[in-house]
Amino acid sequence: MNKEKCHVLCRLKSRSIISKLLVVSILVFVLGLVNAEQTGDSLNTDSDFKNNETLSNWLIQGENFFENGDFVLALKNYQNAYEISPDDSDILYKIGLTHLMLGNMEIAEQYFNDSIRKNGNPEVLFYHGVANYGLKRYSQSVKSYGKYLDFYPNDSYALFNLGQAYEQDGKYNLALQAYENATRVDPSYAKPWYFIGVLYGSFGNHLMARNAYVHYIELEPDDHRGWFALSLEEYSLKNVTESVIAMEHAVRLNSNNTMYQQYLEILLEGDNNSSNKNQNIPLSMISIIIALFTGIISIRCHMKII
């Protein structure tokens, strides 16, 4: 199971969804018994008892399979529960989550929509945003995360994902604001710092970009991309020695990257010739910088469920 799937499972556990489902099932069961006793209909009592016991079993088994990463069997159990209670917003939510984990984004989004229409758990809005992002419906993803954050304004992961959706939707200032809000909520969350650096660098604010990458490296010292990006910003600020040091870190962490090696050679040549320190960036380095920012689009840390 990959890191992002584990992250989803951790989120579910932290929200105590299992407990909520069991409580709902027990309440339904108890209410069914009370109603049967009041009407004196023993036949209905037996029927309600069997239905609610079966429903509870399907949900518990589905949850166990889900937590163990067996999403196909989890889906079968949740679908069986759905046959008994098709209007239960939590069951719709769980089916949607399981489809999401299986990579069925379109189907997942439909189940999330149904759960939202039935006033389901606000948590569904987070994953509705994930599904729409996966479907490249970035404006809708922004709306879903925004509604979710109305309930959970201090969720740094949601703020980061909101920034990702804004960025993909071409709203870079709003993306930057979302990333910075995520760091205010949780300064130890690394990913937003990286993208703050990317955006400030694209805006031409190299000092703010440099500072963001410094924060990122403090939290993720073994990520070669952070050191490489920091090296570029240090060079833009004419801090050639600092740029060399950062690039050397990047090379040590990813020694097979020929672009890093070439960049380091250019930096060392410039650092050994003090007369070059105040000159413009060489054409060859400009090519490397262009390659970097082109590469960022493909290697960025966008949230992926599968």
Image (tube, rainbow, N blue to C red):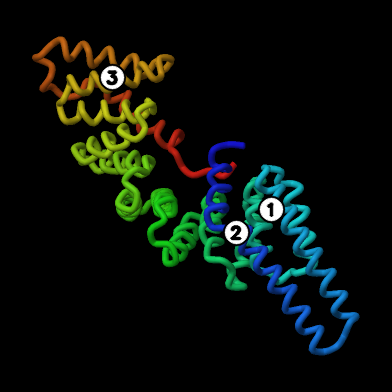
Q: Marks 2 and 3, Cα distance to the nearest angstrom?
A: 55 Å
Residue 136 in sight from this viewpoint: no
Q: Is residue 103 left or right of residue 149?
A: right
Q: Which residue is mark 3?
A: 284
Q: Is residue 199 left or right of residue 303?
A: left
Q: Marks 1 and 3, Cα distance to the nearest angstrom?
A: 55 Å
Instruction: Tell me which amino acid carries mark 3.
Output: Ser
Q: Are marks 1 and 2 in contact (CB under 8 Å)?
A: yes
Q: Quadrant of residue 47?
A: bottom right
Q: Which residue is mark 1?
A: 63
Q: Position of residue 5 (x, y in %)?
A: 58, 43
Instruction: Tell me which amino acid carries mark 2.
Output: Ile
- Of label 1 and label 3, which has the lower sequence position? 1
Instruction: Describe the element under mark 2 as helix, strand or loop.
Output: helix
Farthest residue toward the bottom? Answer: 39
Q: Residues within 10 Å of mark 3 (few under 14, many from 20)?
A: few
**Towards the viewer: 113 or 263:** 113
Q: Which mark is residue 76?
A: none
Q: Which mark is residue 17?
A: 2
